[in-house]
Amino acid sequence: MKIVVILLCCLVVGIIIVLFATRKAQSPVGKPCSICGAESRYGYSAHAEEDADKIKPMCLKHLISQLEEDYTSFAGRAVVIQPADGPPCYVFQPVKEWHESFKDSRIPDDVLSLLAKMETKCHDCGQTANYLWVESAGLTGDNFGKTLDNGVSETLLRHNPKPISLCAKCCVKRISRDLETKHLTYLEVCAPKGKVDGFVIPMGY
Ligand SMILES: [Zn+2]
Ligand SMILES: [Zn+2]
């Protein structure tokens, strides 16, 4: 009987080790940056929820220059929630697709009404603004689902400053500052693409 218990324990430990090892092998974090070879702290993908083999490992410097390019060429508008510690990903979700997948979620309507009220000029430099920056104090790896379900106004904006309008450059500057000063790392980062309005949020799948 004892032997059976010991064998079962070994089996469970073995399975945990294998699961952990394969997860770690898939993570882009710690791999060489796909551009310069330095240790990467981020995975970059073209779209949210990309297959693991399409996520490129990137160091902070190369992630930021990629985000500058993406945010500048985006032709729509987006609510951008400040990077937060906890959720494993920091991704763009187009409002339309999100609504089609999650009919009861209130974030699409909330994002569109916030975007409708945004200022036309960047708060930091005065250029044309197409991003609305929302601070993320209180957002964690456990409660990002509430923001996705109930929207930003009902959750984050209850205890964060009023959102501010930003141009692409100033928006990426703020993202970069947070990634650096908070020592954040994300398995997947993707930026706004195309021309459909949406939102950027720290989240998990
Ligand atoms: Zn690099
Ligand atoms: Zn600006």
Image: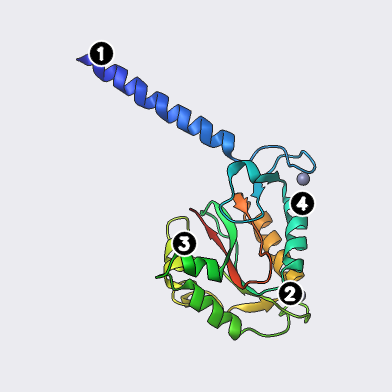
Q: Which mark is residue 98?
A: none
Measure the alpha-carbon separation of dots 2 and 3. 25 Å
Q: Is residue 135 left or right of residue 11?
A: right
Mark 1 → mark 2, Cα distance in angstroms? 66 Å
Residue highlighted by disc 1: 3
Disc 4 secondary structure class:
helix
Q: In the image, what residue type sits under mark 3?
A: Phe
Dot 3 crowding, Cα within 10 Å, few <14, some 14–19, many 20+:
many
Cβ at disc 4 under 8 Å from ligand 1: yes
Q: Position of residue 34 (x, y in %)?
A: 74, 42
Disc on the earlier residue, 2 or 3: 3
Query: Could you tell me which secondary element the residue under label 2 belongs to?
Result: loop
In this orientation, which residue lies closer to the viewer: 44 or 2?
Answer: 44
Would residue 178 be visible to someone looking at this image?
yes
* Residue 14 left/right relative to 179: left
Whether the residue carrying mark 2 lies under 8 Å from ligand 2 is answered with yes
Q: Which residue is mark 3?
A: 144
Is disc 1 surrounded by few (<14), some (14 to 19) or many (20+) residues within 10 Å? few
Separation of residues labelled 4 and 2 (CA atoms): 20 Å
Q: Is mark 1 within 8 Å of ligand 1?
A: no
Identity, as a three-letter code, of the amino acid under mark 1: Ile
- Of mark 4 and mark 2, the one earlier in the sequence is 4
Q: Is residue 156 above or below residue 54?
A: below
Query: Which residue corresponds to mark 2?
Result: 167
Residue, x 73% and y 74% (percent of image)? 167
CA distance separating discs 4 and 3: 27 Å
**Residue at label 4?**
61
User: Tag 1 or tag 4, which sits nearer the N-term?
Assistant: 1
What residue appears at the point 50 percent right and 73 percent down from the top-left corner? 108
Q: Label 2 is placed on what type of residue?
A: Cys
